[in-house]
């Protein structure tokens, strides 16, 4: 990842280039008009009219450049190098000052009326405004940037059993662009793992719901306090952070999700390392992997009067292909928890309640934009059928003396379609066949409405 702005010595280059193009086109127009016979429309009058229109556009662009209002180009590929979705990278498009962007999504879920065994279930349908997001940032100088994401969940922050909403800071960091290859970043950081955690805007992934593997094995959305470096060199881009570790007091048979500390008075007796490396050998192709490892007991757990040491490691590999309307993704993730038996004892967990000693999951997903076969093939609109196969187990291995809950061993088939009338608005609908080894899976139908700006 390099600078998104030219150095000060080159700041006038875009203005000069636009002015030169302006003068060249103006001279062409004057020559054509001078060559026309008196009282007769010059040959190529339509071309001259188009040239006048282009001159007006150029004049407006030059005026923006002179006033400092012009936005800098940040392609989706450059945003990905930053570890950000397209809207989250909004501040990097500003030469100076404040940036405001955001996204939101609403989800309608209808659940089946019986499970795999044919037993009747009665789960009410839900229509939830999942989240409304505001990205706010400030560019102090060419080198110093502040960026943040504020999340409003479930449309309310009211109290009570049915009021699950909250306001959270998803990330908030300061960044110093030290060189083309090295940028320093510190604050509340999205951990650079998987295909969703950093890139969770609803307009950049297929599916009304996020993959379960990137919910239970990689506990998306996952952020922690810390600092590190971000950069790129050629086809390689990387992110490396030191952050506070997870809190094992929140681990359960369902996964590691409740061990996230999310920047709120985070215990930091144990720190963790997280690193990611991606390779983009050609535009549209992404191959990479990431690893997180660190202590998770935070000095809070005792067994037999002694401090219990718990460490957690999560690793994943991923691939993504987005070429000529095809969107293919694959991801495999595996997590391990050391001293899981002792952790169960400290948490009072028995039998099938055991924390998984190993957790793993994977998915394969493919979609194709059918509008590229029609005259509506500008890439900003889409009608994309998609299919996802996913398998995960939050108790792939449990300590000796404990049992695995067969309902944690899940398989999901998702078939759906995404409609994108414009680049920033998406409607996704899909049906999910959900099974598990306990034969208690319940299918569901989903419709999601999302936007970004």
Image (tube, rainbow, N blue to C red):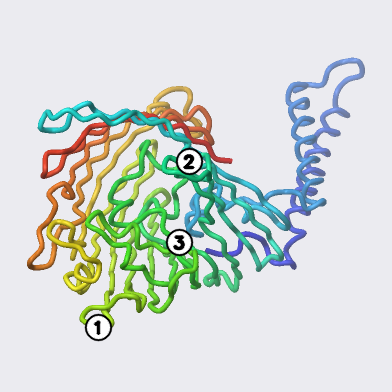
Residue projecting furthest to the right: 38
Q: Marks 2/3: CA distance?
A: 18 Å
User: Where is residue 353 drawn, in percent x and y?
Assistant: 18, 57
Mark whose residue sits in front, 3 or 1: 1
Residue projecting furthest to the left: 401
In the image, what residue occupies the spot 34% across and 64% down? 290
Circle nearer the N terminus (2, 3): 2
Left or right: 441 with respect to 316?
A: left
Q: Taking 114 as reference, is 41 above or below it?
A: above
> What kind of element bears circle 1?
loop
In the image, what residue occupies the spot 73% across and 58% down? 96
User: Where is residue 262 drawn, in percent x and y?
Assistant: 45, 61
> What kind of element bears circle 2?
loop
Q: Label 2, on which residue?
A: 154
Residue projecting furthest to the top: 39
User: Where is residue 40 drawn, in percent x and y?
Assistant: 86, 15
Residue 224 appears in the rendering: yes
Q: Label 1, on which residue?
A: 305
Between 201 and 404, the residue placed more toward the observer is: 404
Q: Marks 3/1: CA distance?
A: 29 Å
In the image, what residue occupies the spot 33% across and 36% down? 367
User: Where is residue 195 drawn, in percent x and y?
Assistant: 37, 52
Q: Quadrant of residue 323?
A: top left
Q: Label 3, on which residue?
A: 262
Left or right: 334 with respect to 79?
A: left
């Amino acid at each position: 990842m390099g600078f998104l702005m030219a150095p000060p010595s080159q700041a006038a280059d875009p203005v000069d280039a636009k002015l030169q193009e302006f003068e060249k086109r103006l001279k062409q127009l004057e020559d054509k008009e001078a060559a026309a016979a008196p009282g007769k429309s010059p040959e190529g009058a339509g071309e001259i009219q188009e040239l006048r229109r282009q001159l007006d556009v150029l004049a407006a662009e030059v005026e923006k450049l002179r006033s400092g209002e012009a936005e800098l180009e940040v392609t989706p590929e450059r945003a990905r190098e930053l570890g950000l979705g397209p809207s989250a990278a909004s501040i990097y498009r500003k030469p100076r000052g404040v940036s405001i962007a955001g996204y939101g999504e609403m989800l309608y879920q209808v659940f089946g009326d019986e499970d795999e065994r044919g037993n009747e279930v009665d789960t009410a349908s839900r229509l939830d405004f999942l989240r409304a997001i505001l990205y706010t940032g400030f560019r102090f100088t060419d080198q110093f940037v502040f960026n943040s994401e504020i999340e409003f969940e479930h449309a309310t922050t009211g109290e009570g059993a049915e009021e699950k909403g909250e306001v959270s800071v998803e990330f908030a960091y300061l960044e110093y662009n030290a060189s083309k290859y090295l940028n320093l970043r510190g604050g509340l950081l999205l951990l650079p793992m998987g295909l969703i955690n950093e890139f969770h805007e609803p307009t950049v992934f297929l599916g009304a719901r996020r993959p379960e593997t990137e919910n239970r094995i990689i506990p998306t959305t996952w952020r922690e306090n810390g600092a590190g470096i971000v950069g790129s060199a050629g086809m390689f881009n990387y992110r490396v952070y030191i952050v506070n570790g997870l809190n094992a007091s929140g681990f359960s048979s369902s996964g590691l999700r409740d061990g996230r500390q999310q920047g709120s008075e985070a215990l930091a007796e144990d720190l963790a390392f997280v690193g990611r490396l991606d390779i983009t050998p050609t535009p549209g192709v992404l191959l990479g992997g990431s690893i997180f490892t660190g202590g998770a007991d935070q000095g809070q757990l005792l067994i037999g009067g002694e401090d219990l040491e718990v460490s957690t490691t999560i690793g994943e590999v991923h691939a993504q292909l987005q070429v000529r309307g095809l969107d293919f993704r694959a991801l495999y993730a595996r997590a391990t928890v050391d001293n899981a038996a002792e952790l169960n004892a400290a948490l009072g967990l028995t039998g099938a309640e055991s924390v998984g000693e190993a957790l793993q999951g994977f998915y394969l997903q493919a979609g194709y934009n059918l509008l590229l076969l029609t005259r509506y093939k500008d890439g900003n609109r889409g009608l994309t059928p998609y299919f996802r196969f996913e398998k995960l187990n939050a108790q792939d291995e449990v300590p000796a003396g404990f049992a695995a809950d067969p309902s944690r061993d899940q398989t999901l088939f998702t078939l759906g379609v995404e409609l994108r009338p414009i680049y920033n608005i998406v409607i996704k609908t899909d049906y999910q066949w959900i099974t598990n080894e306990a034969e208690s899976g319940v299918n569901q139908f989903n419709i999601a409405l999302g936007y970004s700006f």
